[in-house]
């Protein structure tokens, strides 16, 4: 694949945020590349398991993808918002395709506590989470955004506060409630089935 | 939910979140006094928050990347490593995964092998490996795999070699038996590769079926020269570090669940840590040759240690045991290659090759004379298809992994595991059992809970004994009708008749029975005069399901009889009784009913208690079932569910494969009476319900208040129902038992 310059990527991101679906097609492989790069580092045990370092890495992934300082972005928050959305879209689709492939299409809800350890569950969880997140957003759009920025975007509480023009404390407690709600939603569904 | 309500919940949640108990509860009590539903809602969210733990703590990209990293099979496909585009996975192993890749510069297909990082950390070792690998490749021998490049990409070391359109010998052997001429041809070509390498001063060190490839056109390629140097050093480091150094420099196990390699092919010189030369490769290739004919390795054992001990001390079974068609010349060649003292082996691989070539020529000439080339018969694998007659064939979806057998044939689970089953897992008791029979011990007791593999073990022991020339008799008490248990006279006469029948004696017991003597004395005389006096070889007498006797009035008389023969032998070790080996198998569930522990039927003889499978054995069986448990985490989860109970482990894997279930499906069904384990669990409950005091103890254990006394503790434990080191520590044997018993007893 030919390398795409950060400038072009910025253009693609922008185009996609304006509704151009073809731009997404070109962006997906870039995120996959980042995903594989990160996975490879795990395989080689290059990464210490420290969450902060991982966050830094994810941020770096964005910076490699595009130049957020580009004038076409309203601000840094706008860029990260779009990038987090993109990440969500791509990762959930990715999980969905793998889940489908492995399970022959069957969907299921699984316990979440071991999610990070179990690849199969992880795929199912990402999909279930995406569904639950849609319900949350329908009820409380802002909490949905916070989860998207934090979990899919890998942004810190401070960065989210900046993006949403509010205080870190507010983000923190909204995040706590959103997370509790999602957790209950996902586990509750598992019980009900 | 309407926005106002949600806002209300939000407000209360935020305030409550900042308070600790009991202030939190007090706060909620106060503000929700009028609205209990609101309180429940907020409370439930607060609880979820507490329970959520690490939920969503890392980022999605990170979670997905971690997941990918655990599944390397798909990970690299479609990726570029240096200028190689990875196309598909060819095989995986302890030495690294091998991919089919396209060389983008030269537009040709290549095989790309990634070396695990732990093998490449020592720069000096890596350098020596590269040097040796290049030197071997430079020999340009048609039977040595050509290496194109040894490189490094993003800290991953990789080797690029020519791509062989074919199978490893291991895979080839899994498909079907080889003709004798094919066996010889493969060995000759492999020897030819080794001869060239040895002349250049290079020893392979790791000859095994995985390292020999057979191309579609019949060409043989030997792979991985010198690579053993990378791994064996690593293995030593690992064993030394873990404090269990054996002083052995073979590729040993490094961590649980990850087997670095098999030890079956390692030469004694290698095990003894001698400086290796070509004769070590001769031995390993001899093992491969033996396996191609016998369909099993010459030195076997349940554990790595047992295999190593066999390599150092045991003589292999003659090949003629496995196939009558083995020419004596081949027997001689194999024997010479497998000499433990390397000075008595072929001194150069070339001599080994020449002998094989001559033999092959001779066979071909003879065959031409007969104008036919009959297939090479394999006595060891005849009945695999028999298992299918009463059960469907399931074809697993084929994966890209080459070391998978092309088709997995399921066998019914329950009862004895077929002698040639690919699903039989050897345990340490297998070795102990075979050794006891080989030593001609007089009384061997095989005990264990129901369905842990007693009959399977018995069958294997008797089979081996028969192969070694012993006479074998087998009586299954479960197959005897109730009428035989009416009196001790009747049962004893039946036992004697069975012996006479299975040993092909001319005399029928009732012809020599003396009505003035007790049946026990009659039986003893019959054994001594008609059996032991007339048969010169060892007699192995298997008695299965002997627990049937526990519930019959004269059971102790019969046990007394068995014990008395054992004592006779002790008094006269060289007398006729020394040829009799009794093997008695019984289920320890009987302990549930034997209230007096001293009444236990036997306190003499060689006692073997069957172990449960350990984690690795479960992982091994999972692999033999084609891997329905997808990763180690799933295996661990499964292991928690059924413990190492052999029957449960196998039944569950079988169900998953047969029904295409995921682990979660199995978990869903596990504790239902109609589920896969229903019969087993119901019987458990049934035997438990016959004793109220035990039942009560179990109920208490389930409720977390242990109340067992010494007696009930031992009974529950030896019956295989519970585990624990003491009455206080008593707990259900596995999660499945716990779930099921909770459901029915609480």
Image (spheres, coloured by chain):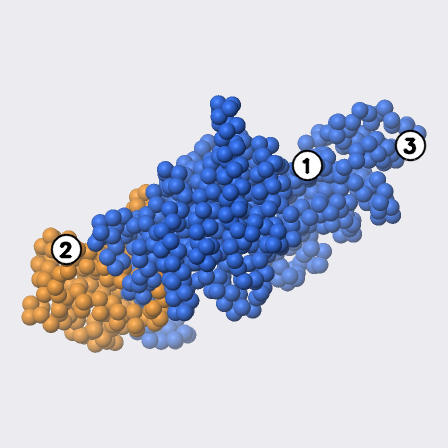
Chain colours: A orange, B blue
Q: Secondary structure at mark 1?
A: helix
Can you give x and y, in whole percent of width and height, for residue B360 in the image? Answer: 50, 35
Q: Dot 3, crowdedness within 10 Å: few (<14), some or many (≥20)?
A: few
| Callout 1 touching callout 3 (CB < 8 Å) | no
Q: CA distance from mark 1 to mark 3?
A: 34 Å
User: Residue A76: horizontal and vertical position, in percent?
Assistant: 14, 71
- Disc sitting over residue B466 in the figure: 1
Whether residue B15 sits left or right of residue B720 in the image: it is: left
Q: Which mark is residue A112?
A: none
Q: Say if mark 3 contacts mark 2, CB within 8 Å.
A: no
Q: Can you see residue B65?
A: yes
Foreground pick, B612 / B277: B277
* Circle on res. B517: 3
Determine crowd level at label 1: few under 14, some 14-19, many 20+ residues with C-alpha closer than 10 A.
Answer: some
Q: Quadrant of residue B76?
A: bottom left
Asked if the residue under mark 1 is in contact with the one under mark 2, i.e. CB atoms within 8 Å, the reply is no
**Chain letter behind tag 1:** B
In space, the residues marked 2 and 1 are separated at their CA atoms by 69 Å
Return the residue at label 2: A26
**Element carrying mark 3:** loop
Given residues B267 and B608, the one toward you in this image is B267
């Amino acid at each position: 694949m030919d390398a795409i310059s950060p400038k072009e990527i910025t253009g693609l991101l922008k185009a996609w945020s304006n509704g151009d679906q073809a731009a997404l097609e070109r962006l997906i492989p870039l995120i996959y590349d980042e995903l594989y790069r990160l996975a490879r580092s795990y395989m080689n045990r290059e990464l210490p398991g420290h969450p902060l370092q991982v966050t830094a890495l994810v941020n770096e992934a964005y910076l490699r993808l595009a130049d957020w300082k580009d004038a076409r972005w309203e601000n840094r928050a706008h860029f990260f918002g779009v990038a987090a959305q993109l990440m969500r879209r791509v990762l959930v689709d990715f999980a969905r395709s793998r889940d489908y492939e492995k399970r022959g299409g069957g969907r299921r809800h699984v316990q979440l506590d071991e999610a990070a350890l179990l690849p199969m569950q992880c795929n199912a969880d990402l999909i279930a989470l995406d569904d639950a997140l849609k319900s949350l957003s329908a009820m409380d759009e802002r909490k949905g955004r916070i989860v998207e920025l934090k979990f899919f975007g890998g942004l810190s509480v401070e960065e989210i506060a900046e993006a949403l023009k509010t205080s870190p404390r507010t983000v923190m407690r909204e995040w706590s409630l959103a997370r509790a709600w999602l957790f209950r939603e996902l586990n509750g569904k598992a019980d009900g089935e | 939910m309407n926005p106002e309500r949600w806002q209300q919940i939000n407000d209360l949640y935020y305030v409550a979140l900042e308070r600790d108990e009991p202030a939190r509860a007090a706060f909620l009590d106060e503000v929700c006094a009028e609205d209990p539903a609101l309180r429940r809602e907020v409370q439930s969210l607060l609880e979820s928050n507490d329970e959520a733990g690490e939920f969503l703590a890392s980022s999605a990209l990170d979670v997905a990347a971690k997941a990918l990293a655990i599944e390397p099979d798909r990970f690299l496909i479609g990726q570029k490593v240096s200028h190689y585009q990875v196309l598909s996975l060819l095989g995986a192993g302890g030495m690294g995964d091998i991919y089919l890749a396209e060389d983008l510069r030269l537009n040709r297909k290549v095989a790309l092998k990634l070396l695990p990082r732990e093998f490449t950390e020592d720069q000096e070792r890596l350098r020596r490996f590269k040097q040796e690998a290049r030197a071997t490749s430079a020999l340009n021998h048609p039977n040595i795999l050509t290496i194109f490049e040894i490189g490094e990409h993003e800290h991953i070391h990789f080797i690029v070699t020519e791509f062989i359109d074919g199978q490893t010998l291991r895979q080839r052997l899994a498909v079907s038996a080889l003709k004798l001429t094919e066996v010889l041809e493969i060995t000759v070509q492999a020897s030819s590769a080794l001869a060239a390498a040895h002349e250049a001063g290079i020893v392979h060190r790791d000859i095994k079926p995985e390292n020999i490839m057979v191309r579609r056109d019949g060409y043989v390629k030997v792979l991985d020269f010198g690579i053993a140097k990378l791994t064996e050093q690593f293995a030593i480091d690992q064993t030394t570090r873990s404090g269990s150094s054996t002083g052995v420099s073979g590729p040993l196990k490094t961590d649980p669940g990850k087997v670095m390699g098999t030890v079956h092919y390692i030469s004694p010189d290698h095990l003894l840590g001698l400086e290796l030369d070509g004769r070590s490769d001769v031995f390993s290739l001899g093992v491969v040759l033996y396996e191609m004919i016998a369909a099993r390795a010459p030195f076997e054992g349940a554990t790595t240690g047992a295999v190593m001990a066999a390599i150092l001390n045991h003589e292999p079974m003659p090949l003629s045991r496995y196939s009558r068609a083995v020419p004596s010349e081949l027997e001689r060649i194999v024997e010479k290659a497998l000499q433990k003292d390397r000075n008595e082996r072929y001194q150069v691989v070339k001599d080994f090759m020449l002998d094989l070539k001559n033999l092959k020529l001779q066979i071909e000439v003879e065959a031409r004379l007969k104008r036919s080339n009959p297939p090479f018969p394999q006595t060891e694998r005849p009945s695999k298809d028999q298992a299918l007659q009463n059960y469907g064939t399931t074809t697993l979806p084929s994966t890209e992994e080459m070391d998978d057998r092309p088709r997995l044939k399921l066998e019914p689970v329950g009862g004895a595991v077929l002698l040639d089953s690919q699903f039989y897992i050897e345990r340490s008791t297998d070795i102990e059992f075979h050794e006891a029979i080989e030593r001609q011990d007089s009384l061997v007791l095989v005990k264990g809970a129901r369905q842990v593999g007693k009959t399977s073990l018995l069958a294997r022991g008797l089979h081996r004994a028969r192969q070694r020339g012993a006479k074998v008799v087998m009586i299954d008490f479960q197959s005897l009708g109730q009428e035989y248990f009416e009196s001790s006279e009747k049962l004893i006469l039946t036992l004697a008749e069975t012996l006479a029948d299975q040993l092909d004696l001319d005399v029928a017991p009732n012809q020599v029975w003396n009505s003035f003597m007790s049946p026990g004395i009659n039986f003893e005389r019959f054994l001594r005069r008609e059996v032991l006096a007339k048969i010169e070889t060892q007699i192995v007498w298997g008695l299965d399901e002997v627990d049937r006797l526990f519930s019959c009035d004269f059971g102790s008389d019969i046990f007394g009889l068995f014990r008395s023969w054992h004592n006779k032998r002790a008094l006269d070790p060289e007398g006729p009784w020394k040829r009799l080996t009794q093997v008695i198998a019984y289920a320890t569930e009987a302990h549930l009913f034997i209230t007096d522990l001293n009444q236990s039927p036997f306190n003499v003889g060689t006692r073997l208690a069957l172990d449960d499978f350990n984690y690795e054995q479960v992982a091994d069986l999972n692999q033999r079932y084609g891997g329905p448990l997808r990763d180690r985490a799933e295996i661990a989860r499964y292991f928690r569910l059924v413990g190492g109970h052999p029957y449960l482990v196998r039944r569950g894997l079988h169900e998953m494969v047969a029904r295409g279930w995921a682990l979660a499906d199995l978990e869903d069904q596990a504790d239902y009476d109609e589920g896969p384990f229903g019969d087993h669990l119901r019987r458990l409950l049934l035997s438990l319900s016959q004793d109220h005091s035990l039942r009560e103890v179990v109920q208490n254990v389930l409720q977390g208040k242990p109340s067992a006394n010494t007696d009930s503790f031992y009974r529950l434990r030896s019956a295989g129902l519970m585990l624990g080191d003491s009455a206080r520590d008593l707990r259900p044997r596995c999660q499945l038992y716990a779930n099921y018993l909770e459901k029915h007893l609480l």
